Image (cartoon, grey):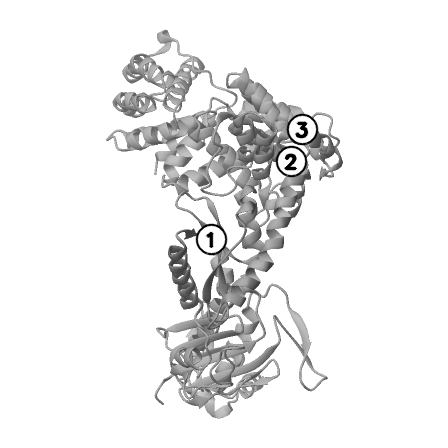
Amino acid sequence: MTAKNLLVELFVEELPPKALKKLGEVFAQSLATSLKNSGLAAAGATVTAYASPRRLAAHVTAVAAVAADKPVVQKLMPVAVGLDAAGNATPALLKKLAALGADASAVPGLRRENDGKADVLFYESLAKGATLAEGLQKALEAALAALPIPKVMTYQLQDGWSSVNFVRPAHGLVALHGSDIVPLAVLGLTSGRETHGHRFEAAVDPVRFDNADEYAAKLATDGAVIASFAERRAEIARQLAVAAARAGGKPIDDDALLDEVTALVERPNVLIGEFEAEFLAVPQECLILTMKANQKYFPLLDAAGKLTNQFLVVSNISPADPSAVIGGNERVVRPRLADAKFFFDQDRKKSLESRVAGLAKVVYHNKLGTQGERVTRVAAIARRIADSLGGGALTQHSEQAAVLAKADLLTDMVGEFPELQGIMGRYYALHDGLAADVADAVEDHYKPRFAGDSLPRGMVGTVVALADKLETLVGMFGIGQIPTGDRDPFALRRHALGVIRMLAEGNLDLPIDKLLNSVFAQFNGIEGFQLNIDALADFVYDRLAGSLREQGYTAQEVDAVVSQRPQRLGDIPKRLAAVRAFSALPEAAALAAANKRVGNILKKVEGSVEANVEHALLKETAEVALHAALVDVVPLADAAFVTGDYTESLQALAALRAPVDAFFDGVMVNADDPALRANRLGLLAHLHAAMNRVADLSKLSA
């Protein structure tokens, strides 16, 4: 039978807007995958997902009415069990065949095959292909079960007795194969060819489809609905750009808001509203957030990125005279902006410093005390870091910023909009007359908040951000709150990456181990606090290794550098560049292999091996030559290392290839004479230390 295109639509009450895009994608893909797996849809069938506030739908091309029959091979039992000595079927075999719908007549056609242990009987049959009604019923049920529903609700069906569970009450089901209805039943609904369009602007109701292929076009003309999420989103973006240009501004760029608004409207119509200019005295972050979060408006910015007193509304209706819609939205937004202004005015009546004492009443963690206690620790850590970086005004401003950094948590504005923590702290710090770098640090100590976020804009902000993140890392590790594979409730991975970025990109002379021990010292006296510094350092270096691999460095290059646990992270790019340059040398592979061999030899020695060599005990020509080469090369490599020229330091080692190869070809390390053996091991220890200052070159060995 000729394949036809298939349409399935589930008509429901308004779906959760933040989940709609994902719901539409999963519904269509799950439905199509099930049809392909059952042989009803071709592997290359085109799947089109539709999702609007009141519907989930999928269009699948080339769907058959009946799937092709499939050959099935079923393993029965060993020949010795299924057939007697005369070759006749045993009762066990006959019973098994009967369960499969066959009888004794199938015995001669059974296939024999050895499975590696014994000869086994196999039954070959032809499974009848599923009909579209059967396959689509299962596919639809599977698609509904696969939906990532945020929260399920239970509702009664029209009979008043039965109830079903779904994300929202469902009111209609369309299932068309070409022009034919496919009989289905889910959620108390039976399939048909009718749906409903826009609540107010549909040209006809219900909207009737004659075939599967006219779905999107007819829903647009008769139902006044743009069914495709992607097309509706693109249309909103287009209208936003046009309206913004007409108003002389640009809409705020927010993909999440655009997705959410796309999930709220079926027929978008962008309108321009405005509010009183006096509200612009409030920090624009507050106004933007309240318009986006509470009203789903797109604030308009001027060419300099400054907020204007106009905003864009994405309406779901298109009246001939939009003034009533615009006026209604302007009336609704005004109290929101007035609240923001009130909070801002009230908050400025108290200084940030006066709020610090109140942090002693705010619980941070039941095992780590209050926010007040945490602020004390962060301030002490910041003071130590700043002292290490030069002290003076940096220490004074860093400590002051650390003390004030969390004070805005007690303001009305942050209480209403937690997303503004830090941002409002900066505004209030400037209002209090504090230095600009202190105010900036109050905001920036949360940075970087996410991958790709900017770093703190000044050294004071960097110091406080480091102190804040290190306090969190050490504190949470000390009470056993260590991230697992799928859980990281305190975002410790993000904090570790933030520390890494600030240390590396800022090229700060702050050794990791010294830094962690300094932070650990601030937790003395906390009951039950136990920290494994090495485990925390491993966690940081693991994040570092992952970050470097994401930047394009090879696993070998990263392992060679990170395995040495370099203390100064600002040196890592230079170390990696040196390793990459060394790897390109013709001597690299041989030296890496030799380094690995030396490391294995030294690991097998009981106790430590000192890198001491007595010249009088060098008997073989090759060991004399290797020692002489080390005497020549190591000072050059070390001098380059000290100046930070890691590439030159590794390049100098290339001269060791010939004497190293000759040594392993002509010298027995484990000599019978203990003195000779110890001296040769000391020579290898000297070689190993010289080769691994920049990176562990053995990691470059294949």
Can you tell which quarter of the image residue 673 is in? top left
Residue at 61 percent of width and 35 percent of height: 472
Q: Looking at the rendering, in which quadrant would you find the C terminus?
A: top left
**Label ID, residue 254:** 1
Instruction: Using the image, tell me which numbered label, if any, was put on residue 353.
Output: 3
- Which label sits in the foreground, 1 or 3? 3
Residue 122 placement (x, y as % from top left) = 46, 79
Q: Is residue 366 left or right of residue 49?
A: right
How many residues crowd around disc 1 within 10 Å: few (fewer than 14), some, or many (20 or more)?
A: few
State which mark lies toward you, 2 or 3: 2
Tell me, for residue 321, which label it has, or none.
none
Q: Which kind of residue does numbered mark 2 sit on?
A: Arg
Marked residue nearer the N-terminal end (2 or 3): 2
Q: Which residue is mark 2?
A: 348
Percent of width and height locating residue 614? 39, 9
Which structural element holds mark 1? loop
Task: Tell me where residue 357 appears, x and y as whole percent.
Answer: 73, 30
Label 2 CA crowd tier, 10 Å (few <14, some 14–19, many 20+): some
Q: Earlier in the sequence, mark 2 or mark 1?
A: 1
Quadrant location of the N terminus in the rendered image:
bottom left
Mark 1: which amino acid?
Asp
Asked if residue 179 lies left or right of residue 282, the reply is left
Residue beneath the point at 51% across and 61% down: 260
